[in-house]
Amino acid sequence: MSLTKSPSIAELNERSREVFRAIVDSYMETGDPVGSRTLSRRLTTQLSPATIRNVMADLQELGLLRSPHNSAGRLPTEAGLRLFVDGLLQVGEISEAERGEIEGHIAASGLSLNQALEQASSTLAGLSSHVGLVLAPKTDRAVTHLEFVPLGDGRALVVIVDENGQVENRVIDLPRGLPASALTEASNYLRARLAGRTLDESRLTIQQELADHRAQLGELTQRVVETGLAVWSDTDRGALIVKGQARLLDDVAAVADLERIRGLFDALEAKENMLRLMDAAESGDGVRIFIGAENTLFNHAGWSMVLAPYAGPGAKVLGAIGVVGPTRLNYARIIPMVDYTARAIGRMLNRKPEIES
């Protein structure tokens, strides 16, 4: 029976540490259970398979290893991976080539902030061979155009253009049978109040008008406006840029089945997770590692996330960047990679003081 509290590294003797490290290293390389005979060939210390089996049994009793169904080998548990990362992991350094690739993509001339962040997410996905994600800071620029475009089936596209020409498209749900005139009236009403103002400023004005019944809108038109306001609230949270999802399909054996991959995709697309992601970035100093079920962002085991905040002028945290993949991530390589990318974004933001949330 496993203990309710995992042991510390100090509680493991040298033999247990060596066996445990070898099992975790093997898991990160292959994702497969490893048995005592295989371990006996990997260890630097001469230990018999029988002795290794006894050590493995002790580690399993401590809750650090598990034995998959119909397998004589062992895999680390999520608690075991946490113990390894906190107590045994030797973090490496990224290569000069990787540094150059990160810097080159982020600092390329002519890129807007969003384009640079897109490049950062794509670069992390490529270098890590997992999913790269970036939480972009919210924008606070004046809006120059807004329009509701009917899509049919009770849906419409909200098109918002800011003063820098950035276009934000969001699909919203509307009452079925809504007349086109209601969308036109809502567009005209909002454009009149948006001219030269930020989304925050416009929302406060409109909410006050609606509350005081000064808007003089029909009931259906007012519902369209209120739905648009809710969309803007999502926009204020920033945008979650996710790259490399297809790479997960190359590693299906390590994450059990396609259903769990679909569950991760759904979690990445959920807007409310952006707030959780930002909270996680702001609540820690530097790189944070979430292993399996510790990661409340996805609400299920099997995945790990390495996350780091990036800051703009005044050391204000504006967003976060990270890598998501199966729990057998190469933490030693990905941790410094995420950290360096976050710092590179920070340097870019501080070179451009006009880019602020």
Image (tube, helix red, strand yellow):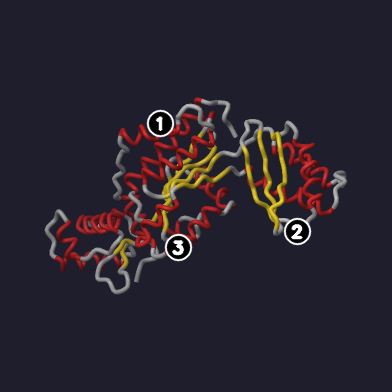
14 relative to 147, above or below: below
Question: Under tag 2, what secondary structure?
Answer: loop
Tell me which residue sits at (57%, 48%) in the image. 275
Query: Residue under circle 2?
Result: 175
Q: Quadrant of the N terminus?
A: bottom left
Q: CA distance from mark 1 to mark 2?
A: 48 Å
Question: Under tag 3, what secondary structure?
Answer: helix
Query: Residue under circle 3?
Result: 260
Q: CA distance from mark 2 to mark 3?
A: 33 Å
The amino acid on which the numbered mark 1 sits, given as a three-letter code, is Gly
- The mark nearer the N terminus, 1 or 3, is 1
Question: Under tag 1, what secondary structure?
Answer: helix
Residue 104 got which mark? Answer: 1
Other residues around mark 1 within 10 Å, as few (<14) / some (14–19) / many (≥20)? few
Nearer the camera: disc 1 or disc 3:
1
Q: Is residue 240 left or right of residue 22?
A: right
Q: Is residue 96 left or right of residue 171?
A: left
The amino acid on which the numbered mark 3 sits, given as a three-letter code, is Arg
Where's residue 336, x and y in %?
A: 36, 40
